[in-house]
Amino acid sequence: MIIYLSSGDPKGTDWLPAECDVSIRPGWFWHKSESPKRLSKLLDIYYNSVGRNCVLLLNVPPNKSGLITDVDAQRLKEFRSAINTIFQHNLAQDCFVKVSSQRGGFGAENMLDSDHLWSYWTPKDDGGEKDHWIEIWAKDESFLRFNVISIQEAIGLGQRIKRHEIYADDKLIVKATTVGYKRLHRLDLGEVQARVVRITIRESKAMPLISSIGLYFDPFWHSKFTVT
């Protein structure tokens, strides 16, 4: 019997996302002397769990009266509000989207609709392309201002991508591996301003099926770097 710890099986037949169990407080139980984690810490947890193809299970312990304390409830409201603020507007929806190729009716527009499961873009399977790519172009010679990039695969048909890269005006800003249901890249470089963003799929198990792409600006993420 093989037990998988902190690893997966690229030849496996089942998609089993990891479950990230964490408490809103320092420990699993309520203590009067403790406080909930800061909003910035909860957002770090979100990007490193949900943003890495995992399921987030956030524990909120009741106090000695069996109730959720006001301070914990308020932090949950702040957390939910922050996520809504970050992802309320997908800049890519206001852009031109180009792709390396497309198969049949599985065009680029499928990556910008509301169906993130069964509607997707896929390139032609003609054996002539080494890499497949998606380009997001700003309109009217303007700049895109963002610090979060989202990619989702049509996970109902399997996890396929093994390596991908992202460029902003031909500058490499992300070099990563798998995507899965959802991959959120919060840019360590900070705010990026670019006219063209290119997602290049360097390696995949089968033809990639991309159900959603997004560019977002996270106002809660602060960095001393700015790329222009």
Image (cartoon, helix red, strand yellow):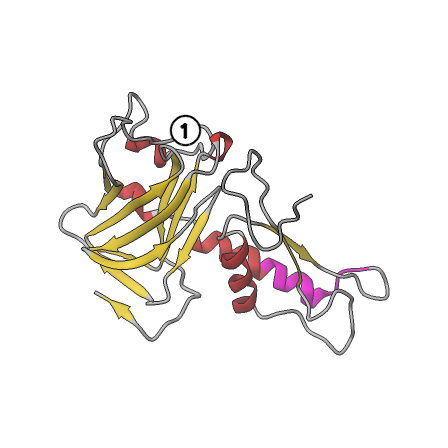
Hey, what amino acid is under mark 1? Answer: Ser
x, y percent for residue 73: 67, 61
x, y percent for residue 130: 24, 39
Q: Is residue 74 magenta?
A: yes
Q: Nearer the viewer, residue 208 or 57?
A: 208
Question: Crowding near pointer 1: few (<14 within 10 Å), some, many (20+)?
Answer: many
Q: Is residue 153 magenta?
A: no
Task: Check the image and name the residue furthest to the right.
Answer: 65
**On-image quarter of the N terminus:** top right
Residue depicted at x 68% and y 64%? 72
172 relative to 210 in the view: left or right = left
Q: Is residue 182 above or below residue 218?
A: above
Question: Which residues, given as a range, are shown in magenta?
Answer: 67-77
Residue depicted at x 80% and y 60%? 67
Residue depicted at x 58% and y 70%? 38
Q: Nearer the viewer, residue 62 or 122?
A: 122
Q: Which residue is mark 1?
A: 119
x, y percent for residue 11: 51, 38
Q: Is residue 188 above or below residue 162?
A: below
Q: Main secondary structure of the magenta part?
A: helix
